[in-house]
Image (cartoon, rainbow, N blue to C red):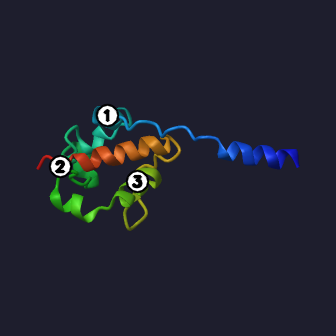
Amino acid sequence: MIGLALAVILAQLPQPAPAPVAPQSDGKKLFATAKCIKCHGEDGKGDTEKGRELKAPDFTSADFQKETTDREMRSGITKGVKDKKRKVLMPAYGNKLSDEQIQLLARYVRSLGENR
């Protein structure tokens, strides 16, 4: 009974404010430290040796930006990307990055299409 009363009291306490959104430069840093640059390039165009080999998408392309939802971006980062034959094109980062980092990366990828 005491546990229930304590749970009710704690539930009524003010909740902490959400963490502030990291600046865009943090997304760029994470893009580099997570080694996204190896395939996607610093500019996100996928124009690297490995990117051309794996047919990495051009994140700056209007078509990519229009055809790819935020949910699909987060899913690709979290679960990885495989081709039709189940060959891994991009490894999964869900066990390497936090949900916040995955969201930050997805926002950064989205931002690469804003300057076109």
Q: Position of residue 105 (x, y in %)?
A: 35, 43
The CA distance from mark 3 to mark 1 is: 18 Å
Q: Residue at x 73, y 44 (%)?
A: 9
Q: Earlier in the sequence, mark 2 or mark 1?
A: 1
* Image disc number at residue 114: 2
| Residues packed near mark 2 inside 10 Å, few (<14), some (14 to 19) or many (20 plus) | few
Spatial CA span between label 2 and label 1 = 16 Å
Q: Amino acid at mark 2?
A: Glu
Q: Amino acid at mark 1?
A: Pro
- In this picture, is 65 found above or below 94? below
**Image location (x, y in percent) of residue 91:** 43, 49
Lower position in the chain sequence, tag 3 or tag 1: 1
Q: Is residue 88 visible?
A: no
Residue sitting at x 36%, y 55%: 73
Q: Disc 3 residue type?
A: Arg
Label 2 to label 3: alpha-carbon separation: 18 Å
Badge 1 is on which residue?
23
Q: Residue at x 46, y 46 (%)?
A: 93
Disc with the residue nearer the chain's start (2 vs 3): 3
**Callout 2 secondary element:** loop
Residue under label 3, please give it. Answer: 74
Q: Which percent across, then down, holds residue 42?
A: 22, 37
Graded by Cα atoms within 10 Å as few (under 14), some (14 to 19) or many (20 or more), the crowding at tag 3 reads many
